[in-house]
Amino acid sequence: MSESAVQIIGHGFREAAEVAAQAIDSDPILEGVTYSILEEDEDRGVWRIDAFPTTDEEVERLKSCLAKHSGLKVVVQTLADADWLAMSLSGLPPVEAGRFFVYGAHDQGRVPPNRINLKIDAGAAFGTGHHGTTVGCLEAFDDLLKREKFERVLDVGCGTGVLAIAAARTGSRIAVGTDIDGPSVRIANENAQLNGAHARFVHASGLNDRRVREHGPYDLVFANILAPPLVALSQDIKEALKLDGVAILSGLLRTQERRVTAAYLSRGFVVEKRIHHDAWSALVLRRTG
């Protein structure tokens, strides 16, 4: 662990920020780093990257990665000696995505009636609902639910489990989530219990684990991960889906859409919808072949 928690911030124009974000995504040393990219000042066209490394190696790698992009001004801030990530997220407002209302314990009194309310507190796993990729997935799912039902749902790279929990709470008979990170699986199972959802989460690498295959083929697969693994898993996701099944993919930048889309089109998918939040994209694809 890094001796002191730090936040690394990069300010610059959109093109420089997106190129830097792609470099972070493609660096194996930075695979587990939490970061966000968003438009900070629309009038001036300024975008911002906020990264939260947890080891000295990640700190140095991020500084080096961002410094290579001349269009970015990089600032390193030392954070207070505390559970800084949970504290920073605890003040976030609730998120509304269609019928879904995602909130933390600090918003217990603001839960509206007649919504699918999901209590997801900030913690060590990704997916509080505030990130543009998670919001995009929930919006895409809400739109699909207006026309069809999904009996069997798989969430690849589940993080907090919010997506599989959303499926379980809206009538999916089977909702399975997987993650390669053990603590995330534990947190996801705790969140499922907290939300009264029958979603089940397993520690597994890939989609060939027996506990994943035994419930397939699935009607819907969520994969909110990163562009490179989305491409690498395109055939596995196809095989996990029934014919005419739907994949909701996110964790990719708008600039990575073409690469990810091409991989799935070649596997017999068609694109039904794109949802954008800041620089992030969510894709809705249907298996037709």
Image (cartoon, grey):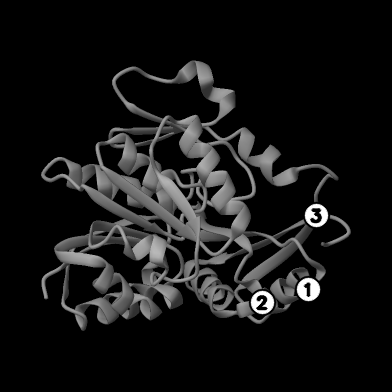
What residue is disc 2 on?
29
Residue 187 position, x and y percent, is: 57, 45
Q: What element does badge 3 sit on?
A: loop
- Identity of the amino acid at label 1? Glu
Ranked by sequence position, the earlier of labels 1 and 2 is 2
Q: What element does badge 1 sit on?
A: helix
Residue 163 — which label? none
Q: Which of 230 and 241 lies nearest the eye of the viewer?
A: 241
Ranked by sequence position, the earlier of labels 2 and 3 is 3
Q: Determine crowd level at label 2: few under 14, some 14-19, many 20+ residues with C-alpha closer than 10 A.
A: few
- Residue beneath the point at 17% across and 64% down: 242
What residue is disc 1 on?
57
* Whole-number angstrom distance, CA of label 3 to CA of label 1: 13 Å
Residue 30 position, x and y percent, is: 64, 72
Q: Which of 203 and 252 lies nearest the eye of the viewer?
A: 203
* Whole-number angstrom distance, CA of label 1 to CA of label 2: 8 Å
Q: Determine crowd level at label 1: few under 14, some 14-19, many 20+ residues with C-alpha closer than 10 A.
A: few
Ranked by sequence position, the earlier of labels 3 and 1 is 3
Q: Determine crowd level at label 3: few under 14, some 14-19, many 20+ residues with C-alpha closer than 10 A.
A: many
What residue is disc 3 on?
5
Q: Which of 19 and 113 lies nearest the eye of the viewer?
A: 113
Residue contact at pointers 1 and 2, CB within 8 angstroms = yes
